[in-house]
Amino acid sequence: MTTLHPFEHLTPSFIQDAIESLGYLCDGRVFGLNSYENRVYQVGIEESEPLIAKFYRPARWSREQILEEHQFCFELIEQELPVVAPLKRDGESLFSYGDFMFALFPRKGGHAPELDNMDNLFILGRMLGRIHTIGASRPFIHRPGIDIASYGHESAKLISEHFIPAELKTSYDTLTTDLLRLMEQNWQVCEPINRIRVHGDCHIGNMLWRDNAPHFVDFDDARMAPAIQDIWMLLSGDRDSQQAQLLEIIEGYSEFCDFNPAQLRLTETLRTLRIMNYAAWIARRWEDPAFPHNFPWFNTVRYWSEHILELREQLFALQEQPLQLYN
């Protein structure tokens, strides 16, 4: 007998029942939105704007960890920062229905920011400076941090033992051993690292640009990490392009928050960890039917060959001089 994945119980009627348990009246319109880690839906509400309902993946975060994410958003809202925070109902922002925890959000429009526009980068830098000032005011107690152990060693172990094709295993194991050694050296050189609450997944898909300003969404990956974690993901192109982009971002950032240039040495370490963790994330979710459907190229010899090639490029990047802040 085939066991259903928990998310397969999220039928339109279940979703509407969950929302109506909070006193809303749904109008029957339920549209799935692009999300894999959790399940997110736009749900029509009678005589009102639609709501965005986010059903958290069971067993990923504890209730305390999710509430820390929400509290961070509320702190940012209190300082009039443009983030899309959960809605409260009777003072609560996290709800339970059946075996799921879920939250509701207002529907907001917008488009991805244009990162080749230097003015936009300056604005993003200012916003991140404000976010990080608040993020540095207190730590997360329950949410984990971004580190080499969980993002690097655990990811490499999972892939090596369960997913890498036999003919590529030696190459993968040798390469990841070298990568982890270099990353640990870079990390140690930068210690002590000031870890603060950060967005954690600060790419253009998690920003809505409207009214000439970015609105940050989806703090699901908020963790304790060095500030550069939210900055390096805005950099793209060749080294000269990234250098120019960095200076523009930091110019805006520094209006509200001091940036330690020593953290620039962590840029390629964090990029490498993200690449390794991304592959392991898909691997850990492979029993979720949405993943083989949406990532059909994963777990093929071609994918792992290209993954190894990408990691080899990172091996060279880790040995290059980091970007600099010029006076």
Image (tube, rainbow, N blue to C red):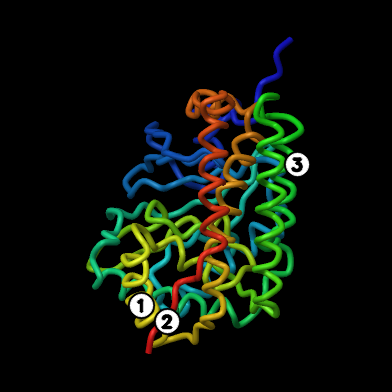
- The image quadrant of residue 188 is bottom right
Residue 246, how many percent across, how many down?
Answer: 38, 72
Residue 177, how many percent across, how many down?
Answer: 72, 49
Residue 310, compared with residue 3, is above or below; it is below
**Pointer 3 with pointer 1, Cβ within 8 A:** no
Residue 38, compared with residue 205, is above or below; it is above
Residue 247: numbered disc: 1
Horizontal placement of 177 versus 299: left or right?
Answer: right
Q: Residues within 10 Å of mark 2 (few under 14, many from 20)?
A: some
Q: Quadrant of the N terminus?
A: top right
Residue 25, how many percent across, how many down?
Answer: 44, 41
Looking at the picture, which amino acid does disc 1 mark? Leu
Residue 210 is at least partly visible in this image: yes
CA distance separating discs 3 and 1: 37 Å
Residue 320: numbered disc: none
Q: Residues within 10 Å of mark 1 (few under 14, many from 20)?
A: many
- What residue does disc 3 label? 157
- What residue does disc 2 label? 325
Q: Quadrant of the C terminus?
A: bottom left
- The image quadrant of residue 272 is bottom right
Of 237 and 131, the residue lying toward us: 237
Q: Earlier in the sequence, mark 2 or mark 3?
A: 3
Look at 50% across and 83% down and name the residue there.
259
Q: Secondary structure at mark 2?
A: loop
Looking at the picture, which amino acid does disc 3 mark? Lys
Look at 44% across and 78% down and name the residue there.
324
**Pointer 2 with pointer 1, Cβ within 8 A:** yes
Look at 52% across and 71% down and name the residue there.
228
Residue 21, how many percent across, how many down?
Answer: 57, 43
Looking at the picture, which amino acid does disc 2 mark? Leu
